[in-house]
Every structure is written in structure tokens, then in C-alpha cells.
């Protein structure tokens, strides 16, 4: 799992040009990571690759996980502040304002474009993972007060990244 402040997490991910065995293996590894870390979604940058791909599951199970390649997102519905965490920012939680609904258009592993609408937790997961593809983390959506409250934990994560053995 790639953690803050790894540079790949702050970069806009690149489109996937060809869906081949390498991409299929990447998707399988991403699903494994998502399950291992008990998430409901995981984006390419979190797996250490600067590619526009994410996986998501409405219930965090392997059976219900889908792969979204080169996704486009259209948020809708009212904004709602709900507590979120991030696998790349362990131990950091805050209320993040996101739309309650969204529609994602993406390509699957067979090269087929599809559109999926979601609400609630899955809509939030889609928006969260899409943010990763844009180089944004939940900390980038923090209010000024949330930034101040998170300062200590962010400093700890930076120290862990710079000194992994300590």
C-alpha cells in the first residue's frame, strides 16, 4: 500500500492505453490490497502506479468488486459531510463534503465501456477513488480547522515515509 507522502499520490494519473495481461494482473493485485486492508475502494496510485484505474466494492467483498479503467465521473445530489478515512493516510479521519450520488462511466477489463450510477457509500467511494486519480487526497479537502487538527498525524506519516525502519 502506497502511503502519504509518496509522490505518486500527488500526481494526476495517466490514461491506460491498452488493456493487457499486465493491467489484468494489476487489477487483481489492487483487489487483493483492497481486501487485505479492509477498504471499499483502491486507486492505481495507492498501488504505486500512476494509471487511471480503480477498484471498488459496495460492501468491501471480493465477489462484488468491479474494476474501473479510465473512469469519468459526474457527481450529483446534495453535498453531505460524512467521516472518511483513506488507506494511504492511516489513522486520519475527517468529515468530507461530497455529493450523495454520482454516475461513473469507465472501461472494464474486457475493453467494454459501461455506466454505473451509485448513491450513499458507493457514490462516496467512487468520488474518493477518482480524487486519487486526480492527485488529490482527503487532506486536500480538509477545512482549515481539520488541517490544523491533522498536522501532527501528517507529520508522523511523513517521518514514517522518510525513515521506514524506525
Image (cartoon, grey):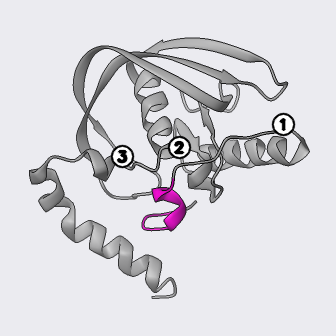
Depth order, front residue of 152/112: 112
Q: Is residue 56 magenta?
A: no
Instruction: Residue at 29%, 67% (x, y): give it.
Output: 154
Q: Is the residue marked by circle 3 packed among few (<14), some (14-19), or many (20+) residues within 10 Å?
A: some
Total marks shown come to: 3
Q: Is residue 5 magenta?
A: yes
Q: CA distance from mark 3 to mark 2?
A: 17 Å
Q: Secondary structure at mark 1?
A: loop
Q: Nearer the viewer, mark 3 or mark 2?
A: 2
As displayed, is residue 133 above or below residue 106? below
Taking the spot 43% from the left edge, 31% from the top edge, the residue there is 127
* Lower sequence index among marks 3 and 2: 3
Residue 160 appears in the picture as rendered: yes
**Residue under pointer 1:** 19
Please rate how many residues cluster around mark 2, counting C-alpha atoms within 10 Å: few if below 14, some from 14 to 19, many from 20: many
The residue that label 2 is drawn on is 133
Residue 150: x %, y % from top left: 21, 60
Residue wearing tag 3: 85
In the displayed orientation, state which residue is furthest to the left: 145
Question: Which is more N-terminal, label 2 or label 1?
Answer: 1
Q: Which numbered marker is on residue 124?
A: none
Where residue 131 sits: x, y (%)? 44, 40
Q: Which residue is at a point 40% across and 27% down the rendered structure image?
A: 124
- Drawn side of residue 90 relative to residue 108, left or right: left
Q: Secondary structure at mark 3?
A: loop
Q: Position of residue 30 (x, y in %)?
A: 68, 46
Please tell me whether residue 102 is drawn above or below residue 6 in the rendered image: above
Give the magenta part as a residue range: 3-11
Amino acid at each position: 500500500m502506497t502511503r502519504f507522502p509518496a509522490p505518486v499520490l500527488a500526481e494526476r494519473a495517466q490514461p491506460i492505453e491498452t488493456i493487457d495481461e499486465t493491467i489484468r494482473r494489476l487489477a487483481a493485485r489492487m483487489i487483493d490490497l483492497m481486501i487485505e486492508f479492509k477498504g471499499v475502494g483502491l486507486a492505481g496510485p495507492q498501488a504505486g502506479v500512476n494509471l487511471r484505474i480503480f477498484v471498488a466494492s459496495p460492501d468491501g467483498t471480493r465477489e462484488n468488486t468491479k474494476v474501473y479503467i479510465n473512469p469519468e465521473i459526474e457527481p450529483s445530489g446534495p453535498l453531505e459531510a460524512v467521516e472518511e478515512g483513506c488507506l494511504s493516510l492511516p489513522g486520519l479521519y475527517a468529515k468530507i463534503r461530497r455529493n450523495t450520488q454520482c454516475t461513473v462511466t469507465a472501461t472494464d477489463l474486457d475493453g467494454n465501456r459501461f455506466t454505473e450510477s451509485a448513491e450513499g457509500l458507493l457514490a462516496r467511494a467512487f468520488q474518493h477513488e477518482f480524487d486519487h486519480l486526480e492527485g488529490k487526497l482527503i487532506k486536500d479537502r480538509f477545512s482549515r480547522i481539520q488541517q490544523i487538527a491533522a498536522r501532527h498525524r501528517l507529520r508522523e506519516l511523513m517521518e514514517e515515509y522518510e525513515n521506514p525502519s524506525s
